[in-house]
Amino acid sequence: MTAFLRNLCRLVDLIVRLCGKAAAYLMPVLAFVVAFEVFSRYVLNSPTIWAFDLSLFLFGYIAALGGAYAQQQRVHINVDILYFRVSKRSRAVFNLISWSLGIFFLILVMKLCFGKFEEAMEYDYRRQSEWAPPMFHFWIMMIVAAGLFVAQLGRDMLAELYFLVTGQPLIEDTDSGSEDNRDENSSDKNEDEKAEAAK
């Protein structure tokens, strides 16, 4: 059973990591689109009708699809002043509560986006701009992004529950932003601050 849970966690980690890194490759595309629009507008005096809409879509894709990867790397905002002053078991309880709320919110997002997708397909909704690109693909992306986030949070909750029951980590997060890495970084930062204060 433990082996199955570990393989499940690794599978979720792999999918989220691939999607997150794939979304990162859209960053230079976004930069190029914005730079091209600036060049066209101020140098050629011929602004495009598509660059603004495309840059909005690209930014939305990057931000939404990167959410699950950010969770995997543990880089979302946290109240560290309290979080790192309690035991690991207490942190696990905090995580379970906050991640449960996160999953609830993301399920609502998925439901809302699915409704928007149906409307976009039925009524051919488009951006209200001169280019007027279709909107259905954006809602599909939002559903996928929220689903990935739910999968990552579910994976993390499974690992925390296993730790609470057994006292042992389910899987070593050696290639992601694990709590142990954050603990080490936090302690290093505290030591640096103490050294500076001593000077």
Image (spheres, rainbow, N blue to C red):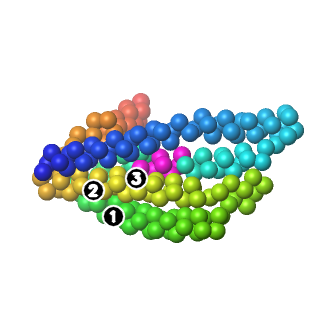
What residue is pinned by disc 2? 157
Give whichever of discs 2 and 3 has the lower sequence position: 3
Q: Position of residue 95 (x, y in %)?
A: 30, 57
Please tell me which residue is depicted at 73% across the width and 47% down the height of the picture.
50
Q: Of 22 and 59, which appears nearest the observer? A: 22
Please tell me which residue is depicted at 28% across the width and 36% down the height of the picture.
174
What residue is pinned by disc 1? 100
In the image, residue 103 sits, relative to residue 1, either above or below, namely below
Disc marking residue 148: 3
Q: Does the segment drawn in magenta span residue 64?
A: yes
SS class, disc 3: helix
Q: Give the extent of the magenta segment.
A: 62-68
Q: Are marks 2 and 1 in contact (CB under 8 Å)?
A: yes
In the image, taking residue 25 as reference, residue 124 lies left or right, namely right
Determine if residue 186 is in view. Answer: no
Q: CA distance from mark 2 to mark 1?
A: 8 Å
Q: Amino acid at mark 1?
A: Ser
Give whichever of discs 3 and 1 has the lower sequence position: 1
Q: Amino acid at mark 2?
A: Met
